[in-house]
Amino acid sequence: MKLTVVVYSAPYSSQAAWSAYQFTRAALTAGHEIYRLFFYADGVHNTNSLSIPPQDEFDLVKAWQSLIAEHHIDAISCVSSALKRGVVDVQEAARYERTCNNLISDVTLSGLGQLVDATLVSDRVVSFGA
Amino acid sequence: MHESMNDSANQPQRKILTFISRKSPYGQSHAKACLDMVLSAAVFDQQVNYVFMDDGVLQLRRGQEPAAIDSKNLSAAFSALPLYEVNNVYVDTQSMQDRGMSTEDLVVEAKPCTAGHIASLIRQSDVVFNL
């Protein structure tokens, strides 16, 4: 089945982001296709490479990064949600004259149109954490 | 669902997307996040149902003055819904009653509906977003 996963919640605030990660991993293991992974609203914090959990805690941002890279998942962080919350890529950092960028690799900043497109193409859209 | 499996990704498709907005307009970002999704779906020419229930009905209340808490007026954006051809706007009657509201308090024209009606909207939908 062709799935799109939407993540609304930040890591370390609620279980939802972990559930989204575990669902995505389980779906891939079961042979489903992840058409798109869309981080929206507080969900963009999942793509902040400056997140540093204590060593004895699960590093969710790193785990997302590995999963996305390993399975070549089309992963999008909503650009307007991300900029407001201080998650920027190289281009946005340059555009707004900021001194650093922090979007994890293999994730793209893009608009809600990507979510609508994914909704139309996917067999199921599964949301976590509203 | 069968349609989406048979159609290729390149063919234009139309789905019934239902958005259920159930949070108050300020204090959390859910209401604005839901509105933005609705407008995006409408731009993509999808059949959109926009449902307000629980605290979400407060978003439709007249006379909001969010400038006092440094917030942007969300209800002003609702007047743009007809321009986006979002005409299927529903409001849960029970949620309004629970909060001492009637249709006269609403800033937009919304169709009063029951939980049963919302359940049937959900059944008819291809995708439901709930936030």
Image (cartoon, rainbow, N blue to C red):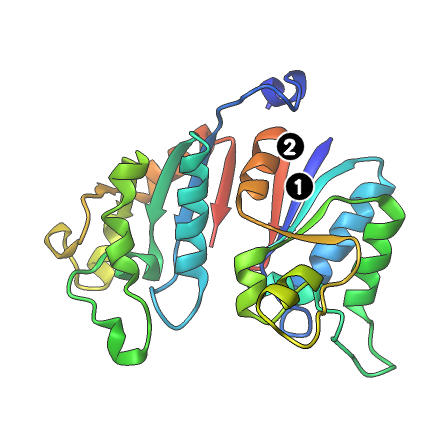
Q: Which disc, if any, is residue A4?
A: 1
Which residue is located at x 83 percent, y 42 percent? Answer: A28
Please give the residue where the numbered disc 2 appears in the rendered image. A122
Seen in the picture, residue A99 relative to B106 is either above or below; the reply is: below
- Residue A9: quarter of image: bottom right
Can I make out residue B88 in this image? no
Pinpoint the chain carrying mark 2.
A
Question: Residue B86 in the image: x percent, y percent?
Answer: 31, 37
Q: Amino acid at mark 1?
A: Thr
Question: Residue B77 in the image: x percent, y percent?
Answer: 29, 53
Is A16 placed left or right of A73 in the picture? left
Question: Residue B70 in the image: x percent, y percent?
Answer: 32, 77
Q: Nearer the viewer, residue B62 or B125?
A: B62
- Residue A85: quarter of image: bottom right
Q: Nearer the viewer, residue B73 or A20?
A: B73
Q: Amino acid at mark 2?
A: Ser
Seen in the picture, residue B79 relative to B70 is either above or below; the reply is: above
